[in-house]
Amino acid sequence: MTTTEDSAKGSQGTARASYIYGIVPAGVRIPDGLDPIPYGEDGNQLGLVTEGRLAAVVSDVAADRALGTRKDLMAHEAVLNAIAQDTPVLPMRFGAVVTDDDAVAEELLAPHQDYFVRALEQLKGHLEFRLRGDYDQDAVLERIIEADPRIQQMREKIAGVDEDASYYDRIRLGEAISKAMDQLRADDAQASVDALSKFAVATEVKEAGGENGAVHLAFLVRTDHRSDFERAVDELGDAWSGRIELRLIGPTAAFDFLPEFDAPDEAQA
């Protein structure tokens, strides 16, 4: 049977569709005070479409509205992250829209009950954290130069030399420093994994990004290991103080750790 709870069905003349945030076990309660993706002048509310053992977290959206603003994405993630604090949730890809609540039940939940139930059971009692770090540019450059005599020689060679005259030497120096930075990022990512993976059930190394980006990793952590994990992050931050500034983001929904087993393409969250 399909039921919709706390759903705001507005009176606007624009054709409505159902926006899907994620899938949760049937019977859960949506936290109060969450702001869904906006819909019309009257605002919007979150609802649950329930089918069997599952429920989808939904809200109204104008059928002809283009999604993709930063505000839309932040609302999508904020809803899922808040729900994940209390219950396992399978995040849907940003922008998942179907014609109405009946389609949510009949086309998404009903055909894939077993897959989604197993996935939710696997995520139960786990939270995702992301660790990001940025280099202090002066400190990391000094470390690279001190560690590589060849770079020291190249730097000394162009010191005081006209830029035009030393153009190709400067290019070679820049390439050498860039290569050393790439290796340093790989080493620091591995050091993060070595220090923290013992407190996580899964780890993913991601592209650090940005000129000063040092590390970017995602961890799936059991809730009863959270304090140990956070303590280890603090210790790593202390060890890297003055060289890398670490930021721990989370806990969040498990965006990077959706369970992997056979499922029809249309069921992919």
Image: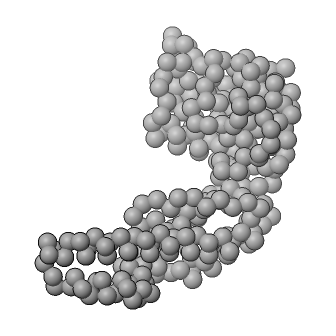
Residue 173 in the image: above or below residue 203: below
> Where in the figure is residue 101, as x and y percent of width and height?
70, 20
Residue 224 in the image: above or below residue 60: below
Q: How is the image coloured?
A: one colour
> Where in the figure is residue 117, as x and y percent of width and height?
84, 38
In the current view of this chain or complex, which residue is farthest to the top?
13
Image point (81%, 24%), residue name: 111
> Where in the figure is residue 187, as x and y percent of width and height?
56, 74
For the N terminus, which image quadrant?
top right
Report the front residue among 101 and 32.
101
| 249 on left or right of 4 | left
Residue 159 in the image: above or below residue 72: below
Based on the displayed image, in which of its 4 quarters is residue 129 positioned?
bottom right
Report the front residue among 6 and 220.
220
Residue 60 in the image: above or below residue 255: above
Image point (72%, 41%), residue name: 90
Total count of labels: 0
| 3 on left or right of 135 | right
> Where in the figure is residue 178, as x and y percent of width and height?
39, 70
The reply to whether residue 227 is visible in this rendering is no
Report the front residue among 218 and 154.
154
For the C terminus, which image quadrant?
top right
